[in-house]
Amino acid sequence: MSTRLVVVHPDPDVLAEAAAARLLTRLLDVQSVRRPAHVVLTGGTVGIQTLRAAAASPLRAAVDWSGVHVWWGDERFLPAGDADRNETQAREALLDDLVASSGLREENVHAVPARGDGPGEAATPEDAATSYAAELAAHAEEDGTPHFDVLLLGMGPDGHVASLFPEHHALEAPGYTVGVHGSPKPPAERVSLTFAAIGRAEEVWVVAAGSEKAEQAAAALADGPMTEVPAVRAVGHHRTLWLLDAAAASARG
Ligand SMILES: O=C(O)[C@H](O)[C@@H](O)[C@H](O)[C@H](O)COP(=O)(O)O
């Protein structure tokens, strides 16, 4: 039985700091009982701000980064190194420093293949999704995905999480990854974990800030229709956390 908690912080900066501290502590807790730990990152404003806060936290030195694997819940299907890729922004915010000075292993940073024709790249979002699914399976402890200890998700003002948008065919995609076209949030082409993959995470954390998220956060927490507010399907199999700032929580009954 999955439990759900909602935690409200006063503003986006405190939210990001609190999410970062919670993330680092979660990794410490996991590493007390199990190795390796698998964390799934998100793109978006708060998602990246959380990584920057983790980079600046004294707590980061307590994590054994050599035993951490990093994944992404979604990726914008762009050339390698593009500033808009979630991977690029996560590397700049935290990962490159962890690799350089804290023992995170480059081979344990599992980026979604970039658009291109070079080694490890893909010509289409579907090809990238297929390759990413194979990478997940190669590190699976059970049934096709690693044991995701914590999976972070931002939420858009339309209630999307990862690259799973309202009324989009990807909402019901089979398997664990999906190529996305026609994203209403640029860029149009993306790669995403499916809700089947997201639901395999032990803990799912939805991190959202801003009044523009309030209506859909309230709708998701009221268990609204998934086609209209996909975030309602962002559920971990053990625990789901909604980490909000006061503005994003302002429409809750
Ligand atoms: O690739 C992306 O854009 C993200 O993965 C996306 O799911 C993001 O987390 C939300 O759109 C929230 O983004 P903001 O926090 O910037 O509103």
Image (spheres, rainbow, N blue to C red):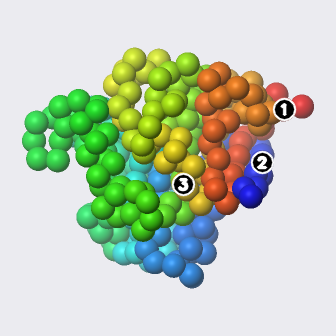
- Residue ID for mark 3: 200
- Mark 2 vs mark 3: which is more N-terminal? 2
- Mark 2 vs mark 1: which is more N-terminal? 2
Kindly identify the amino acid type of the residue bearing the numbered disc 3.
Arg
User: How far apart are the alpha carbons under marks 1 and 3?
Assistant: 27 Å
Task: Determine crowd level at label 1: few under 14, some 14-19, many 20+ residues with C-alpha closer than 10 A.
Answer: few
Q: Which tag is nearer the camera, tag 1 or tag 3?
A: 3
Q: Is residue 53 above or below residue 140?
A: above
Q: Is residue 31 above or below residue 81?
A: below
- Which of the two residues, 92 or 184, is positioned nearer the viewer here? 184
- Mark 1 vs mark 3: which is more N-terminal? 3
Position of the N terminus by quadrant? bottom right
User: How far apart are the alpha carbons under marks 2 and 1?
Assistant: 11 Å
- Residue ID for mark 2: 6
User: For the residue with label 1, is its CB less than 8 Å from the closest atom of ligand 1?
Assistant: no
Image quadrant where residue 106 sits:
bottom left
Kindly identify the amino acid type of the residue bearing the numbered disc 1.
Arg
- Residue ID for mark 1: 252
Q: Residue at x 55, y 56 (%)?
A: 201
User: How far apart are the alpha carbons under marks 2 and 3?
Assistant: 20 Å
Q: Is residue 139 above or below residue 231?
A: below
x%, y% of residue 214? 74, 28
Image quadrant where residue 182 sits:
top left
Q: Is residue 19 above or below residue 172?
A: below
CB-based contact (under 8 Å), mark 2 and mark 1: yes
